[in-house]
Amino acid sequence: MVHAPERPPAGAPPVRINLYSDTQTRPSPAMLDAMMRAEVGDEQHGDDPTVHALCDRMAALMGKEAAVFMPSGTMCNVASTLVHCRPGEEIIAHETAHILTSEGGAHAALGSVQILPLKGPRGMYTPDALRGALRGKSRHTPTQRLVEVEQTANTGGGAVWAKATLDEIAGIAHGAGLSTHMDGARLMNACVAAGVAPADMAAGFDSVWLDFTKGLGAPLGAVLCGSSEFIDEAWRWKQRLGGAMRQAGVCAAGCLYALDHNVDRLAEDHANAKALARGLAQMEGVEVQDPDTNLVFFTIPGTGVAATELVRRVRMEGVALSLLGGRLRACTHLDVTAPMIDQALSAIRTALSRG
């Protein structure tokens, strides 16, 4: 049975401090103003100048030939695998990758491809693990076609793949005749944290996309980048999956604003996540994973409080947390300030003290 999204507890007040996800960000007044003033046209006919400006800028930023504006990162992933793979072929990815755990089985349902899950700490597999997963060609096994990474690794705690590791993985894949794809949902978080330019981070990957609805604060949109031939085929799948977005420049303007104003400030989110993790680590019975970026994962095995109960208690105080893979997750973003971190820690401390 498929369940509708969960609702807040009965009687819960409005959320004051939203650590549930960076997808909860709201466009700022300045971003909304840029969207309202956007020059628009029909994207289907190539007449939207703001969409063109965004795609040209993103292709250059990622070091690729071309780009296409999509409604969501999930659609970017789905379109990418549908371009790269044919029915019966195989994708290699980490066992916690978004394409495997969070996209409704779209890659099997729409592309008839299977995903070979690799293990590894913090949402990342090693180059040796990839080498060990490669098979020789045989009519008895599926053809391996694509190697995928997720930068940052969400369920790995927002962990950042090192550029050297990504380059080695891409080299192994290409040496074996496989294509490469980077799920870049939080790629700019990784670039800011590591001090690596996006084009350098994605250099070894045939396709890569960036989500604007997380730390970058736009209300919707993601941009998929690759070769001109790849993007032509991705556009065909965009048409099949739902078509063009018509006067999409309204949304593209929000993404352009984000590139201009919301990238460097991601470092503030990372600092707030570190502060939150330090505060949680000081609480008895709480175990915290040190964050690389803006995601703080923690468990509370020694508190006598169930994780679901803690989520409920702090939500009644106007603080929103999430549960992911059996762990609690707090996500910092542009709508979370440093004083809010102190307030959230106070709410969590009080909730745990009730035993």
Image (spheres, grey):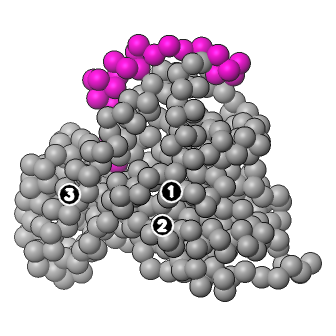
* Callout 2: SS: helix
Residue 289 in the image: x percent, y percent? 28, 74
- Name the residue carrying label 1: 200
- Which residue is at a point 82% across and 73% down the rendered structure image? 142
- Which residue is at a point 29% across and 29% down the rendered structure image? 28
What amino acid is labelled 2 in the image? Lys
Q: CA distance from mark 1 to mark 3?
A: 24 Å
What amino acid is labelled 1 in the image? Asp
Left or right of 300: which side holds 250?
A: right
Q: Quadrant of the C terminus?
A: bottom left
* Callout 1: SS: helix
* Callout 3: SS: helix
- Name the residue carrying label 2: 163
Left or right of 11: which side holds 61?
A: right
Front in this rendered view, residue 265 or 122: 265
Residue 257 in the image: x percent, y percent? 38, 29
Q: Does residue 34 sit above or below 1 in this rendering? A: above
Q: Quadrant of the N terminus?
A: bottom right
Q: CA distance from mark 2 to mark 1?
A: 8 Å
> Is residue 96 visible from the viewing direction of this image?
no
Name which of mark 1 and mark 3 comes first in the sequence: 1
Which dot marks residue 154? none
Q: Does residue 70 sit above or below 156 in this rendering? A: above
Label 1: few (<14), some or many (≥20) within 10 Å? some
Residue 42 located within the stretch drawn in magenta: yes
Residue 146 located within the stretch drawn in magenta: no
- Name the residue carrying label 3: 271
Magenta extent? 22-47
Front in this rendered view, residue 149 or 12: 149
Are dots 2 and 1 in contact, CB under 8 Å?
Answer: yes
Label 3: few (<14), some or many (≥20) within 10 Å? some
